[in-house]
Amino acid sequence: MKITMIGAGYVGLVSGVCFADFGHDVVCLDKDESKIAALKKGEIPIFEPGLAQLVAHNVAAGRLNFTTELTAAVAGSDVVFIAVGTPSRRGDGHADLSYVYAAAREIAANLSGFTVVVTKSTVPVGTGDEVERIIRETNPEADFAVVSNPEFLREGAAIEDFKRPDRIVIGVDGNGDRARAVMTEVYRPLYLNQSPLLFTSRRTSELIKYAGNAFLAMKITFINEMADLCEKVGANVQDVARGIGLDGRIGSKFLHAGPGYGGSCFPKDTLALVKTAQDHDSPVRLVETTVAVNDNRKRAMGRKVIAATGGDVRGRKVAVLGLTFKPNTDDMRDSPAIAIVQTLKDAGAEVTGYDPEGMDNARKLIDGIEYAKDPYEAAARAEALVIVTEWNEFRALDFARLKATMKTPLLVDLRNIYRKDEVTRHGFSYASVGRPD
Ligand code: UDX
């Protein structure tokens, strides 16, 4: 298959290179010339384990190319994926679809032969209808089908997720036999590998993506509230999570209590679902509450750190380990660290931050703090050390070394990566989330 991927962002790049690895002929396209120039030189704009090697391998094999030129790429394609950004629109929280519709217009003008146009970007229900309308209006002669195929990959495990998906959802409307056949061919290696291909209507497929992310966000938020309750009643949230997660109807994943969810998907997608539901006079109150509870939680975690220090951080140094919204990414979008650091700064603390991969992005988003080159430099003279993101390199800290450099040996572990006794035997005080400390 000849595939064009419009948008060489996170989803576009990962999907494009994985399709190339399946043996398809893929062109990744982006308007950003510097990004394409860098990709052509083998420079990858994001940090994602395994991505650079997979790009290099498929470029060398001649199956993966990068371009800024849409015309030729689209004209020669069997399938054109739209994988452009759909950020939250400023002011109202709706998904901003201007990039999707602009891509639809440009694609329309260049279609030749039967082409399947696939929205991979996360788009509100009904967007596929509008993409179809735009293409038909721009090019009444075009022979095409518009398909929805949402992406469920997680940052940090994106390639693995793409190649071993729990399911592939494909939304096709009308008499979509040709489109279904093309999409089955696109995903052939996975299909042969027993990954379920779920064909639905286009609107259903669009909603599945939002419903899935909202459900996971709700699950995390639920266990976070249980963690707060555990602290009040003297129970252990990790045991609660295990105790309920072993029930097959609930499942053990996404039950890790922490500082609240962040990232490029959950905050944006939950908000967009809330807006869509309100517009259709069918409010999703559980999701509305999830959004509100999670927003409050981030600052509450800042207050938790302050409480652990005794209640007053004015003029005292606090070291924050882990700034990205989760490990194995350099992504800082909606990271809980942003609100936690802000709360600490508002209370007068002097904050030092360290992150293995997120420092460049953190500097753009968080100012007025010091940045350290490693956890030990961050901890020097600090009166609290706070783990916000569970990077592996924070799982085996040298406590003797930390104690020697800190002013007060206190660890606030917002990801529960240590046990209390492991930390206190080094002379540290310890606070974590939802566990009897
Ligand atoms: C998510 C979805 O998992 C993915 O299917 C979708 O395509 C995009 O959004 P991602 O944002 O990369 O992926 O990260 P994910 O691993 O889902 O974590 C999201 C946030 O939830 C992170 O801030 C993480 O720390 C938090 N989280 C996750 C918890 O606090 N507890 C958990 O048990 C799981």
Image: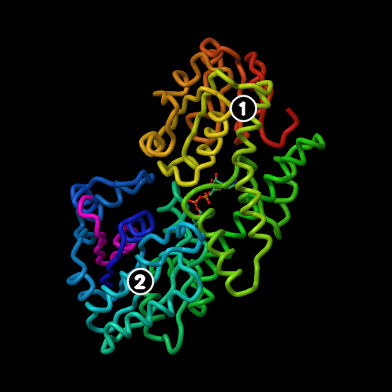
Residue span colored magenta:
17-34
- Amino acid, disc 2: Tyr
The image quadrant where one finds the N terminus is bottom left
Residue 427 % position (x, y)? 65, 13
Q: Nearer the viewer, residue 200 or 266?
A: 266
Label 1 close to label 2 by CB (< 8 Å) = no
Q: Nearer the viewer, mark 1 or mark 2?
A: 2
Residue 370 % position (x, y)? 43, 24
Residue 164 % position (x, y)? 46, 58
Residue 161 % position (x, y)? 46, 55
Q: Which of marks 1 and 2 is nearer the N terminus?
A: 2
Magenta residue check for 31: yes
* Separation of marks 1 and 2 at Cα, in angstroms: 46 Å
Query: What residue appears at the point 43 percent right and 80 percent down from the top-left corner?
Result: 129
Q: Which of 20 and 361 is in front in this view?
A: 361
Q: In this view, does 19 lie above or below 148?
A: above
- Amino acid, disc 1: Val
- Location of residue 146 by image quarter: bottom left
Label 1 crowding class (10 Å Cα cut-off): few <14, some 14-19, many 20+?
A: many
Question: Within 8 Å: ligand 1 and the Cβ of disc 1?
Answer: no
Q: In this view, does 434 lie above or below 426?
A: below
Q: Residue 101 carries which label?
A: 2
Q: Is mark 2 on a helix, strand or loop?
A: helix
Q: Is mark 1 on a helix, strand or loop?
A: strand
Q: Residue furthest top?
A: 404
Q: How many marks?
A: 2
Label 2 crowding class (10 Å Cα cut-off): few <14, some 14-19, many 20+?
A: many
Query: What residue appears at the point 39 percent right and 36 percent down from the top-left corner?
Result: 357
Magenta residue check for 194: no
Q: Residue 412 carries which label?
A: 1
Q: Residue 336 carries which label?
A: none
